[in-house]
Image (spheres, rainbow, N blue to C red):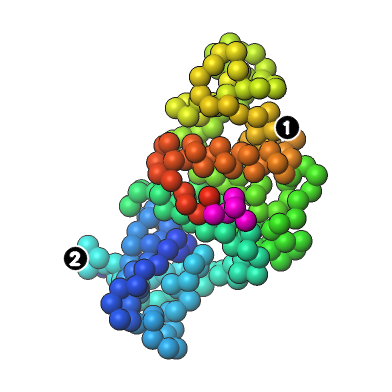
């Protein structure tokens, strides 16, 4: 059976002497794996389709439960990402997060759209002032873009982060507070539970969720460290995020 799907390359692995197996995030079918035959040969026409972040319309042949790519038409390769190390690593985190949160054959159109738009934003960042630049409010550069995406991804996977009032006593949060790794909610220090969290972390998350708050550069980095721990608690570790935070 032959079928088409718009897809984003999450990762690729060598298979045999000349082939690769790609893991794709498709708009129509969720995550799937497919063989790309002969793409390691010099001058292979589909070599681009095995590159990281490739966004293309793929044509597949399915036989005995296995998919093979027979053609692809490129939408965007997000090539500017390769010119900025921070933006590149942020895109790697995006792909790893999608790979770990998605299941084969289960659609996630909201996350797919968020992933493509985030790669576009990171590419624009790389072309502009660069992924390391930060405004005073912390909303420029790759960190804030990545924070917004990870919050969306966790929500779509069923692990939303809540940054409202304390869920226990209803008090407005400020100063010292806690973050509950089970519920994904910030709470006040007086009610206890969870791990310590700074006010700057809380405000950065609120800003990224579109709930107001000032996102400083330090707060955004702290928020990413918190999400790294939360991600590990809910699914598995994100090694690429730890590498990104060390840049």
Name which of mark 1 and mark 2 comes first in the sequence.
Answer: 2
Question: Callout 2: few (<14), some (14-19), or many (20+) C-alpha neighbours within 10 Å?
Answer: few
Q: Which residue is farthest right? A: 136
Q: Which residue is farthest bottom? A: 43
For residue 100, above or below residue 76: above
Q: Which residue is mark 1?
A: 213
Asked which quadrant contains residue 244, the reply is: bottom right
For residue 40, above or below residue 205: below
Q: Secondary structure at mark 2?
A: loop
- Which of 172 and 44 lies nearest the eye of the viewer? 172
Seen at 54% across and 39% down, the residue is: 227
Q: What x and y, as percent, mark residue 101?
A: 41, 46
Quarter holding the N terminus? bottom left
Magenta residue check for 40:
no
Q: What x and y, as percent, mark residue 53?
A: 51, 65
- Magenta span: predominant SS is helix
Q: Which mark is residue 187?
A: none
Q: What x and y, as percent, mark residue 75?
A: 54, 69
- Which of 69 and 181 lies nearest the eye of the viewer? 181
Image: magenta residue range: 243-247
Q: Are marks 1 and 2 in contact (CB under 8 Å)?
A: no
Q: What x and y, as percent, mark residue 208?
A: 65, 39
Seen at 72% across and 61% down, the residue is: 130
Spatial CA distance of label 1 from label 2 is 53 Å
- Which of 177 and 5 lies nearest the eye of the viewer? 177
Q: Secondary structure at mark 1?
A: loop
Compared across the picture, whether 8 is left or right of 15 comes to right
Seen at 66% across and 54% down, the residue is: 142
Compared across the picture, whether 107 is left or right of 110 comes to left
- Which of 65 and 53 lies nearest the eye of the viewer? 53
Q: Which mark is residue 64?
A: 2
């Amino acid at each position: 059976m032959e079928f088409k799907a718009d897809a984003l390359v999450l990762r690729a692995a060598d298979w045999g002497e000349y082939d690769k197996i790609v893991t794709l995030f498709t708009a129509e079918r969720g995550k799937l794996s497919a063989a790309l035959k002969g793409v390691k040969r010099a001058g292979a026409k589909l070599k681009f389709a095995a590159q990281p972040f490739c966004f293309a319309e793929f044509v597949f042949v399915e036989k005995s439960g296995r998919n093979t790519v027979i053609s692809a038409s490129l939408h965007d390769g997000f090539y500017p990402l390769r010119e900025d190390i921070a933006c590149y690593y942020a895109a790697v985190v995006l792909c790893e997060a999608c790979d770990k949160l998605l299941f084969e054959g289960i659609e996630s159109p909201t996350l797919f759209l968020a992933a493509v738009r985030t790669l576009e934003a990171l590419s624009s960042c790389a072309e502009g002032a660069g992924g390391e630049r930060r405004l005073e409010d912390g909303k420029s550069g790759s960190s804030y873009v990545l924070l917004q995406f990870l919050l969306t991804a966790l929500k779509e996977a069923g692990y939303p982060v809540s940054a409202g009032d304390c869920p226990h006593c209803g008090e407005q949060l400020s100063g010292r507070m806690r973050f509950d790794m089970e519920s994904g909610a910030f709470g006040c220090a007086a009610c206890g539970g969870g791990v310590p969290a700074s006010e700057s972390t809380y405000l950065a998350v609120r800003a990224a969720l579109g709930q107001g708050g000032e996102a400083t550069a330090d707060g955004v980095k702290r928020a990413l460290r918190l999400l790294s721990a939360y991600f590990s608690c809910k699914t598995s570790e994100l090694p690429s995020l730890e590498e990104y935070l060390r840049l």
